[in-house]
Image: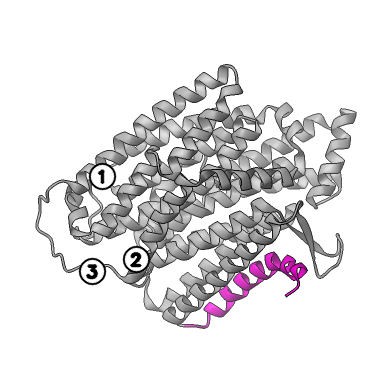
């Protein structure tokens, strides 16, 4: 196979996922599940091959769909960062699905189980498109597909909680999408282009001329606020606990681990390839992201401490972890961005582990999610107990796990920030203490002697054990072999410039 043929893989991955969603609509639930697993495996392999190919290159490449230039054709772009995110996201989606598919067939009515896998495939295609696209309007289209698919994953469980949660999520997302669309419209009216490099070229000229400074500031504000709302940056995160906490296990794992990350990846690409980092820094928008990121770190953890439901606690923790990512972006330095991208990977690898393990603990505790009922659950389900403990230790920042590297990178990135260094260090310290309060409390609770007798006949499926094992190994690999991954992130960011 010619190496140049590999350049088709991003396009193939997006199209395969989209058409797989269509095919799943005519299959029954079990066939749709097997078909979706095969497709996700194929996409993971294509992404891995692309990673290896781009790592051997010195620059990224652009693929014109249909080989027609803009405005008749469309473009996707692949660099080291895009290929790596594609591989990790598709792998995580596959194993998160495997860890929770027993609950899918329990929570979703048989007549609608195939539609669940339609949503999974659409979600995968939209995440890949957000990662690879080189066209800002195409990005908006797939932002909406991502939103609809995520909403479907919440609603398919169909109880009162999920319908309310999906409605709140949809209303909030519509506000974010509207602001993003207004920003794109204004951007197009200023530059006359939709492709990332063309917009960037025009904006650079306008910036040097000193014209359109106020409209450009408005554009930046609309796009940033729109994507911040959609990615659940505090205080736009009120929908998170219900959406993540009441959806079926696989949905909660996928939503918390991946969906919000797609919007953040798009924001990073817009900063680098559309607007430009110099313009972003001078607009002072990163100062706002820095402040709200820190607020999210603290408030998410405080709300998690007050929870008595393990899944809602994990959901509030996601609000705090999104705050970490935005704090890193708000530092406005390359080191801060490396830390933010690392935490995207770390959180994506850890949060599905926590959701899947929490489901295993609930399964041996009368399906209860209350801490009192979960006492001793790790003895009844050792695999789930180990998985939750490792996920919790990673989130707290204990060495050997991926979360520890995140906090080291954030602390190191803050050293050259002057007065912000002390703010960052203080926020990291407070957040770590708060994380320890609710995560370690839960670990202690599930390993305490049992206070009730439960039916211990629940037996973990092989898929559950494989899923937990994958996420545990991924966390340890990231925690113990961080330098190669950090080098790839740096290489990817350099390719974005």
Choose between 192 and 172: the one closer to the eye: 192
Cα gap from disc 2 to disc 1, whole angstroms: 20 Å
N-term mark: 1 or 3: 1
Q: Which residue is mark 1?
A: 443
Name the side, left or right, on which 406 lies relative to 368.
right
| Residue lying at 83% horizontally and 39% vertically, measured from the top left | 203
Task: Give the residues in magenta.
Answer: 1-27
Q: Position of residue 358 (x, y in %)?
A: 30, 54
| Residue lying at 46% horizontally and 78% vertically, measured from the top left | 34
Choose between 246 and 426: the one closer to the eye: 426
Is 359 located above or below residue 27 in the figure? above
User: Residue 490 shows which numbered tag?
Assistant: none
Q: Which residue is mark 3?
A: 459
Residue 450 belongs to the span the image colors magenta: no
N-term mark: 2 or 3: 3
Q: Which residue is mark 2?
A: 464
Name the side, left or right, on which 33 lies relative to 368.
right
Magenta segment, principal secondary structure?
Answer: helix
């Amino acid at each position: 196979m010619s190496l140049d043929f590999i350049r088709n893989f991003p396009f193939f991955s997006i199209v395969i996922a989209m058409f797989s969603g269509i095919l799943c609509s005519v299959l029954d639930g079990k066939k749709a599940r097997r078909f979706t697993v095969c497709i996700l495996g194929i996409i993971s392999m294509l992404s891995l091959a692309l990673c290896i190919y781009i790592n051997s290159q010195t620059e990224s490449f652009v693929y014109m769909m249909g080989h027609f230039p803009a405005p008749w054709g469309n473009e996707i772009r692949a660099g080291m960062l895009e290929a790596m995110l594609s591989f990790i996201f598709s792998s995580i989606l596959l194993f998160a699905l495997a860890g929770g598919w027993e609950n899918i067939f329990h929570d979703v009515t048989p007549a609608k189980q195939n539609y669940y896998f339609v949503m999974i495939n659409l979600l995968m295609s939209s995440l890949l498109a957000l990662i690879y696209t080189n066209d800002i309007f195409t990005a908006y289209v797939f932002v909406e597909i991502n939103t609809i698919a995520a909403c479907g994953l919440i609603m398919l469980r169909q109880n009162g909680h999920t319908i309310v949660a999906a409605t709140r999520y949809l209303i909030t997302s519509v506000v974010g999408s509207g602001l993003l669309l207004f920003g794109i419209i204004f951007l197009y009216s200023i530059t006359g282009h939709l492709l990332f490099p063309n917009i960037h070229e025009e904006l650079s000229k306008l910036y040097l001329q000193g014209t359109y400074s106020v409209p450009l500031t408005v554009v930046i504000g609309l796009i940033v606020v729109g994507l911040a709302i959609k990615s659940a940056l505090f205080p736009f995160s009120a929908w998170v606990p219900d959406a993540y906490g009441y959806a079926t296990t696989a949905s909660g794992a996928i939503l918390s681990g991946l969906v919000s990350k797609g919007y953040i990846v798009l924001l990073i690409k817009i900063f680098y390839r559309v607007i430009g980092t110099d313009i972003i820094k001078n607009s002072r928008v990163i100062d706002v992201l820095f402040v709200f990121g820190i607020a999210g770190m603290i408030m998410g953890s405080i709300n998690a401490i007050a929870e008595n439901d393990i899944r809602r606690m994990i959901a509030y923790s996601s609000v705090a972890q999104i705050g970490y990512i935005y704090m890193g972006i708000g530092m406005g330095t390359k080191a801060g961005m490396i830390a933010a991208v690392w935490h995207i990977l770390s959180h994506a690898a850890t949060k599905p582990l926590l959701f899947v393990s929490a489901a295993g603990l609930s399964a041996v505790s009368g399906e209860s999610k209350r801490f009192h009922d979960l006492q001793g659950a790790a003895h009844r389900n050792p695999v789930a107990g180990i998985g939750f403990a490792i996920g919790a230790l990673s989130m707290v920042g204990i060495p050997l796990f991926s979360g520890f590297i995140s906090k080291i990178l954030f602390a190191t990135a803050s050293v050259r920030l002057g007065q912000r260094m002390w703010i960052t260090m203080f926020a990291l310290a407070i957040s770590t203490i708060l994380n320890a309060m609710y995560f370690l409390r839960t670990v202690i609770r599930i390993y305490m002697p049992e206070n009730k007798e439960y039916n211990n006949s629940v037996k973990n499926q092989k898929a559950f054990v494989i899923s937990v094992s994958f996420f545990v190994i991924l966390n340890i690999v990231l925690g113990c072999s961080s330098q190669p991954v950090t080098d790839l992130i740096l290489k990817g960011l350099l390719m974005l410039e």
